Image (tube, rainbow, N blue to C red):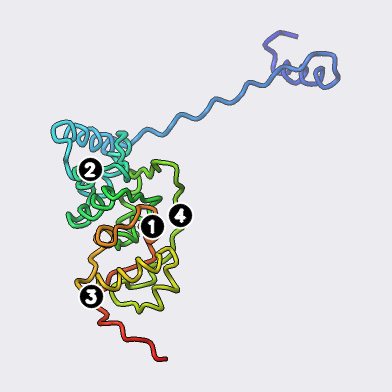
Amino acid sequence: MGRGHWLDPLARGLLEAAGQLPRRETPAPRPAAPEPRPLEERVEQDLLELKLEHNPNLRLANAQEVHHAAALGWRLDVNRASADDWLRLPQIQRDQVDLLLRLQQGGVQLSGPEDLQRLLDLPAAVVAIWEPLLQFRWYGDGAPTAVRPLLIDLNRAPAQALERQLPQLSPERRQRLLRERQRAPFQDLADLQQRLQLPAAVVEDLIGKVRFGQGSAGPELPRSA
């Protein structure tokens, strides 16, 4: 029988099954080559890279540019980002950036996209656009706390509601909150932190639990005997 005969593999298989020949190892399949990126996508990413080299503070226009920037390795460290970093994100507003920076200066940290969405009262779709670039690194020894949906209006809630729903505020801080909001309604968490001199950990625990309605609740009436 010639070596190249078509029965050779069959005969060898029978002999291997009978134990008269050692079995040959089956070579591992080669991994599939990655799908090449479409030419248009490669061109757009290369073009964005050139734009970013010429203008590091370039504002990204849409979700596609965010995707390309993430592929190029750019990231935004949420708890250390500068105003220029934030302003590169599509659809972000300067007053939102100002709030983020004031809280950062007060030592407040965000633990995830949900914190950011609730703090800035953003649609989930906007945060989803940003998310490929966002990094939530926690600095220091404390651990992030769990968050809940917005519940209580600090500018209008009565004292009993504050006592019941915000146990993280001491009685002295709750009384100061009541006095301060009569002087002027609180604008946001940064304003609350500054006027009540709250530690960063307390403010972090309030994210997603409070809101700031317009106007004052009016003076607190004494409780009836």
Mark toward the start of the polypeptide (4 vs 1): 4
Residue 75: which disc? none
Question: How far apart are the two marked residues, 3 and 2, measured between alpha carbons?
Answer: 33 Å
Mark toward the start of the polypeptide (3 vs 2): 2
Tag 4 secondary structure:
loop
Looking at the rendered structure, the kind of residue marked 4 is Thr
Question: How far apart are the two marked residues, 2 and 4, measured between alpha carbons?
Answer: 24 Å
Q: Position of residue 11 (x, y in %)?
A: 78, 18
Q: Mark 2 highlights which residue? A: 82
Question: Relative to 49, does residue 9 appear above or below in the rendering?
Answer: above
Tag 3 secondary structure:
helix
Residue at the extreme left: 54
Q: Mark 1 highlights which residue? A: 202
Q: Mark 3 highlights which residue? A: 182
When asked about the image quadrant of residue 91, the answer is bottom left
Are the residues flagged by discs 4 and 3 in contact, CB closer than 8 Å? no
Are the residues flagged by discs 2 and 4 in contact, CB closer than 8 Å? no
Are the residues flagged by discs 4 and 1 in contact, CB closer than 8 Å? no
Q: Nearer the viewer, residue 52 or 29?
A: 52
Query: Residue placed at 27% from the left, 46% from the top?
Result: 64
Question: How far apart are the two marked residues, 4 and 3, measured between alpha carbons?
Answer: 30 Å
Q: Position of residue 105 (x, y in %)?
A: 26, 48
Which image quarter is the N terminus in? top right
Of badges 3 and 2, the one in the foreground is 3
Query: Residue placed at 43% from the left, 71% from the top?
Result: 165
Residue 145: which disc? 4
Of badges 4 and 3, the one in the foreground is 3
Question: How far apart are the two marked residues, 4 and 1, measured between alpha carbons?
Answer: 10 Å
